Image (cartoon, rainbow, N blue to C red):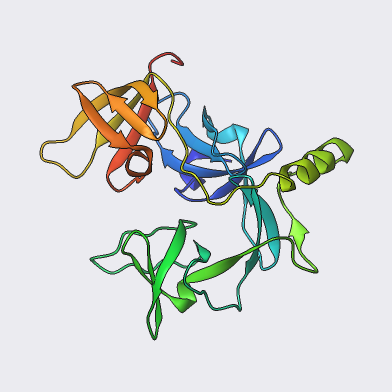
Amino acid sequence: MKLINVRKGQFVYYENKLHKVYSIKPFFKQSVHIARLEDFEQELVTAREINYYRPKHLDSFICQSKRFTLHKEQRAKVGDYILVINPRPDSLDHHHLHAIELVSSLEDNGVISNKSNGIKHNEYWVMVPGLLEGATIIDYQFPDAESAGMIETSELTDESQMEVPLPKIGDIFQKNDTEPFFQAMVVAIDGQTIHLGGNVQVPAEELVDTDRWTFILNVYEQ
């Protein structure tokens, strides 16, 4: 891909596995920040190392050790995970392309997510748990016998909920919802609690909210 075509939220393949773009830093050599969907392992890559993929109805993939199948005609229920396909947020909402959100309540014309986003029914597809009949597995760009075996093994993992991705020691993040902006480095990780320089502690779920924090770089990978 060319960097000018890379957008936040896009599904891409990197090293044969399905990832999602978290952010783009055009002034860095490794300018694309991606996360592998199966376990949210994060990587910094160049645009030419990734290949774009547009999700389709009945595509199936593993996300945080659980298999889901996308269904564009199903209405979400409370407790469902949804994938934002056609984002049209208003001034109070912050969902974006391919945001994965948990439905916390229902409204006549849409849902309210656990991040307090109002998402209309025509903006999302439901992530139905499991492998539906007629589904296409998209975990690998070039499936083979080895990757098929890994898919079967991954499906045996029993996870009760989707965890958020953890950063790495040395990652620098910029806080976007304060004036002025400030940057801090990850110095320690204690479970789902992230310790930043300056004696700042945040839950991992907050740190991966790209409306509040932006990943800059890892000081040990430059």
* Outermost residue, left side: 179
Q: Quadrant of residue 128?
A: bottom right
Asked if 14 appears above or below 116 in the picture, the reply is above
Asked if 2 appears above or below 217 in the picture, the reply is below
* Residue at (37% x, 69% y) in the render: 88
* Residue at (61% x, 32% y) in the render: 49
Asked if 96 appears above or below 73 in the picture, the reply is above
Q: Residue 124: image x %, image y %?
A: 50, 69
In this picture, residue 8 sits left or right of residue 152: left
Q: Residue 158: image x %, image y %?
A: 66, 47
* Residue 164 can be seen in this image: yes
Q: Residue 169: image x %, image y %?
A: 40, 20
- Foreground of the two, 107 or 147: 107
**Tag count:** 0
In this picture, residue 138 sits left or right of residue 44: right
Q: Quadrant of residue 58?
A: bottom right
* Outermost residue, bottom side: 108
**Quadrant, the C terminus:** top left
* Residue at (42% x, 40% y) in the render: 23
* Residue 142 can be seen in this image: no
Asked if 218 appears above or below 173 in the picture, the reply is above
Q: Residue 129: image x %, image y %?
A: 64, 62
* Outermost residue, right side: 145
* Residue at (70% x, 58% y) in the render: 60
**Quadrant, the N terminus:** top right
